[in-house]
Image: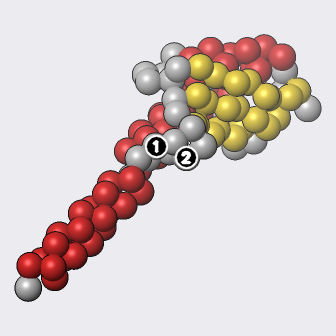
Amino acid sequence: MLKSSRITKCMTSFVLIATLMGCAATQKHESTGQYVDDSVITTKVKTAIYSEKNLKTLQINVKTYQGVVQLSGFVDSEENVKKAGEVAEGVKDVTSVKNDLHVK
């Protein structure tokens, strides 16, 4: 009886630890909270870019990983490349911007 109680406690502890470890962030993977935060940042950046008069284009792709925003795609001028980067940097919670936009 005492032995089965110990086994049950050990198994319960193991399951609890494994569950908590599954939600932890590593250098290569985001936690669930970070993923949600990055999704919110991506949406805010897309909205800010689309709200700009000269940047109303769906050819700008936005991806976010741990607060770092990556812009890719095509715009009409070098000025729009710079403007898109500035707009993205101005969004709350953006830590940095990697601007990979190209002029078509």
Up-down relation of residue 13 to residue 26 (above or below): below
- Residue hosting label 1: 25
Tell me where residue 67 appears, x and y as whole percent.
52, 29
Q: Residues within 10 Å of mark 1 (few under 14, many from 20)?
A: some
Q: Does any portion of residue 75 appear in the rendered image?
A: no
Pinpoint residue 95: horizontal percent, then vertical percent: 52, 20
Label 1 element class: loop
Give how far across and how far down residue 83 sits, in percent: 68, 16
Q: Which residue is at 15% across, 79% downward?
A: 3
Q: Which mark identifies residue 29?
A: 2
- The crowding category of the residue bearing disc 2, from other C-alpha atoms within 10 Å (few below 14, some 14 to 19, many at least 20), is few
Q: Is residue 104 left or right of residue 92?
A: right
What residue is shown at x 26% (from left), y 72% (from top)?
Answer: 11
In front: 39, or 60? 39
Residue reaching furthest right? 104
Compare residues 30 and 42 and report the one nearer the observer.
30
Secondary structure beneath dot 2 equals loop
Quarter of the figure that contains the N terminus = bottom left
Q: Alpha carbon of mark 2 to alpha carbon of mark 1: how far?
A: 6 Å
Is the C-beta separation of discs 2 and 1 under 8 Å? yes
Residue type beneath disc 1: Ala
Q: How is the image coloured?
A: secondary structure
